[in-house]
Image: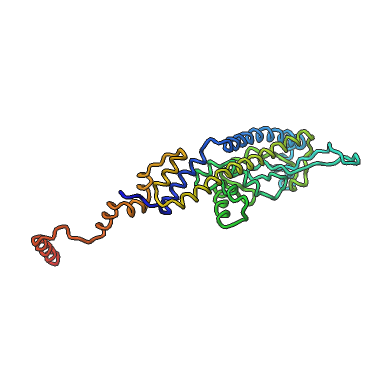
Amino acid sequence: MSKVRMNTELRNKLFNKIKHTFENEDTQERELYLQAREYVDEQYKSASELAKEVVERSYPVDDVATLRTFKKKYGQPCDVVAKDKCFYFAHNEDTDEEGETTETKSHFDFGLFGNLNGSEYNHEDGKKFAVAYYREELKAKECNPDIYAQQNENQDNPHKTKHVDQCMKALGYSSGSDEIGMAKEFDNPYFLDVIGTSYCRSRAIACTKDEYSKFEEWRIAKANLVAKHQSWIDTIQKQCDQLKIGLKAYRYLSEGIELATELGIQVDEAELIRTNSTGLTIYNPSNLASMIKGMKNKQLNNTREAKILARKQYEESLN
């Protein structure tokens, strides 16, 4: 067999196999990302439990039950109890330079796409958190959860938009409040009863400075997961950039195989070619010959007897 020349499909197959190894290596960056995700789970548990205490302190369970009873009795005019997963928490324990009491408040959203900076309307950072948190699940759905990290320094473009939209659809994102799928499952445990039908920004819920700090710690943990995901993907991107340059320069598959071997990655050349749609047919002389022979419209037996038999069969078919 002659040396197999590289083509685009072989380069892509080899690239994806090596990249897959990069993504699953036990590196320091990957470990920090995994630790950050575990810490998010811990913080969500403690912060949501604290939120329940704070919210029920302002909206006692007995009052909520009474208002629901009135709603059943009087209908719409008493429909003032709602469930929510985002809250404005506020404390008044700080003072300004003149010694006057100041209010410190912020928006805390426990939903999967909740903001990371206190903004009630900016969900973009929340989307970054969501793809970092559900990375494996999105990979299993053939989405690219690393798209934000890969495109971190780029403006919006069709490639980025395409993959972000695929991730959001897989997660169950909605521009409104009716999340589905994974997003709905994630959000459900964090809904609490509140009194008042106005937007959450108009009903700041009182808490202590220490409680407020714990809510901030939870939100910082979410932002840290995004940062650790970014740092990990940055290292993979740098390796992949060099990998692309090398594979593009190689003329023969054997050079790519040698590179993989040097990186400690075992690649079966025969398997790589066998699963390739063009490499085996074009570059293997035996298979190329077989393919060409198969294109010929030949008679299997060209003897005089065979010709007479064929003519007889043809005439019989006309009768």
Nearer to us in this view, 54 or 305:
305
> Residue pushed farthest right?
98
Viewer can see residue 299: yes
The tally of labels here is 0
Pinpoint residue 17: horizontal percent, then vertical percent: 45, 44
Residue 284 percent coordinates (x, y):
31, 51
307 is higher (above) or lower (below) than 92? below
User: Residue 319 lies in what quarter of the image?
Assistant: bottom left
The reply, left or right, for residue 267 in relation to residue 309 is right
Residue positioned 56% across, 50% down in the render = 169
Q: Is residue 115 above or below residue 93?
A: below
Q: Is residue 84 visible?
A: no
Closer to us: 303 or 175: 303
Q: Which of the 4 image quadrants contains residue 208?
A: top right
302 in relation to 105, above or below: below
Q: Residue at x 52, y 47 (%)?
A: 240
Q: Position of residue 160 (x, y in %)?
A: 57, 53
Q: Quadrant of residue 52?
A: top right
Q: Is residue 10 left or right of residue 2?
A: right
Foreground residue, 22 or 50?
Answer: 22
